[in-house]
Image (tube, rainbow, N blue to C red):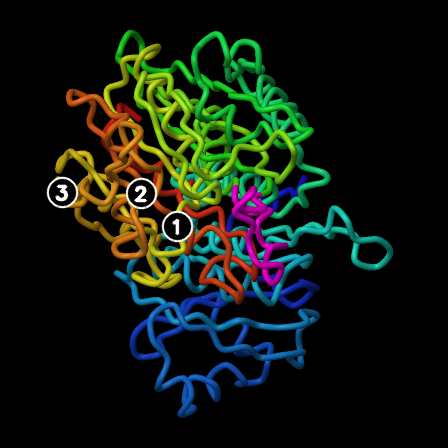
Amino acid sequence: MTVPARIDYAETDLDALAGWEGRVVVLVGEGGKLDPAGRRVNRLTRGALERLLASEAWGKAKPGDVQTLSWPGGMAAEAVHVARLEAKGSAEAARKAGAAVGKAAAGKAVLVLAGSARHAHEIALGVALRAYSFTDHKTGDEAPRETAVTVMASRPDEVREAGRDIDAVAQGVFFARDLVTEPANVLTTTEFATRLEALRETGLEVEVLDEPQLEELGMRTLLAVGQGSESPSKVVVMRWNGGGEAAPLALVGKGVVFDTGGISIKPAQGMEEMTMDMGGAGTVAGVMKTLALRKAKANVVGLVGLVENMPDGRAQRPGDVVRSMKGDTIEVINTDAEGRLVLADVLWYAQERFKPAGMIDLATLTGAVIIGLGHENAGVFSNDDGLCDALLAAAKGEGEGAWRLPLGEGYDKALKSNVADMKNVGGRPAGSITAAQFLKRFVKDETPWCHIDIAGTASLSSDGPFSPKGATGWGVMTLDRLVRDRFGG
């Protein structure tokens, strides 16, 4: 398990700056004006800071950009990071600056000279998020090293209070990233369920439904996906009850721990990346951990369907017809369109059992959403403008890209089947939309619902703004903020 940076808060101590041995962060606002800590660093480095601020490179710097002075003379620090942050700058710029420092400082001690700056806690969060490094399967010198962040401020208690939930958020994001990064021979469906059961120590109620229970419930579309695998299919239910008697928000995640495509097998090239096909379940797990750790004043239930999609003599075939928990029949045209079959049953179960005030599902569902939106935005689909607008606002506030795409009855034509109530795919045109339209059939009219296709954002092939190459934990911060803003805290 990857542990986020430890964040401490202290009153500004100018006399401690010369002997600090890690990395020091100086904040500089408009016009290059230095606060007392900045002036002390400038004096210790014999004017190096002023020379940097007079340079052409600094003149081109934007809010949140960072310039670095390596091995500054007159200080024990190995680097001084100079961040441009305006006095009334944004939280996004502060987090961006922190992330730039976190990239360089993973495994180091970081001292943030915050003074009286706004959003000092956001700098610390940026450092923590970007300093992530998954090393569980590395040995020797690549074993994990802790990043420690100290925020020196003129009013440290106020900064501590503003950032009281930073650790909970970072732990949730890291948990999601760890789950997505784990190889499939380690993170089997059973191991996944075991890790979620361990969340009971945070105060979550956790229940694991096994195959006989799923069969009794009628979750035959979910079970059909996993019937070719030796790993048993499961549904895990996580409940956080912090909001009294209010109906809960339901979060539903696709948890395909490995996706070969089944009988409709994928090409070999790139198949190793299908360890991340449980990204939706990873995000749901991360959100639930964050809510529990920060003792959210809301009722939220997280449900994840855990399966493995393998080719085998028992695997479902193209042309099979399966019956969902709802009772609708589905002609399986392509066994590689398995995520929607998993979600169909879990969505219906969530509504039947919990009568949620709203429901959001997350899934690495379609390659088509990557064609449409690239890796900058998750695709969002909804039957409720209010819930969708709140979700998009939360994503914007957290700097996680999301874009709404349409739904409509016209897309249903592509899902018509001659032998069943529907097909599981609608062809190449509008592939992410027809997938969402398929899921909509398992959402009751009275249930406000959003579907988020995170195929392009769950894992990146290059560094992201707040994460290194690989798993991002996309959605943990967005959904945590949505719970704060719309569902009671």
**Residue 268: x %, y % from top left:** 62, 59
The residue under label 1 is which amino acid type? Thr
Mark 1 sits on what residue? 366
Task: Check disc 2 and give the amino acid type.
Answer: Ala
Q: Nearer the viewer, residue 83 or 409?
A: 409
Q: Secondary structure at mark 1?
A: loop
Q: Is residue 330 above or below residue 185?
A: above
Q: Secondary structure at mark 2?
A: helix
Mark before the other along the chain sequence, 3 or 1: 1
Q: Mark 3 falls on what kind of element?
A: loop
Is residue 421 left or right of 113 when viewed as pictured?
A: left
Instruction: Decide: is 272 above or below 61.
Output: above
Residue highlighted by disc 3: 408
> Does the magenta segment cover residue 80?
no
In this rendering, is residue 70 above or below 339?
below
| Marks 2,1: beta carbons within 8 A | yes
Residue 435: horizontal and vertical position, in percent?
Answer: 31, 43
Dominant SS of magenta comes to loop
Q: Which image quadrant is residue 414 in?
A: top left
Task: Tell me which segment is drawn in magenta.
Answer: 259-277
Taking the spot 62% from the left edge, 63% from the top edge, the residue there is 105
Give the image quarter of residue 424: top left
**Disc 3 and disc 2: Cα gap in Å?**
12 Å
Amino acid carrying label 3: it is Gly
C-alpha separation, residue under disc 3 versus residue under disc 1 = 18 Å
Q: Residues within 10 Å of mark 2 (few under 14, many from 20)?
A: many
Q: Position of residue 391 (x, y in %)?
A: 25, 40
Choose between 6 and 8: the one closer to the eye.
6
The residue identified by callout 2 is: 435
Q: Using a 10 Å C-alpha cutoff, classify the residue at mark 3 as few (fewer than 14 neighbours), some (14 to 19) or many (20 or more).
A: few
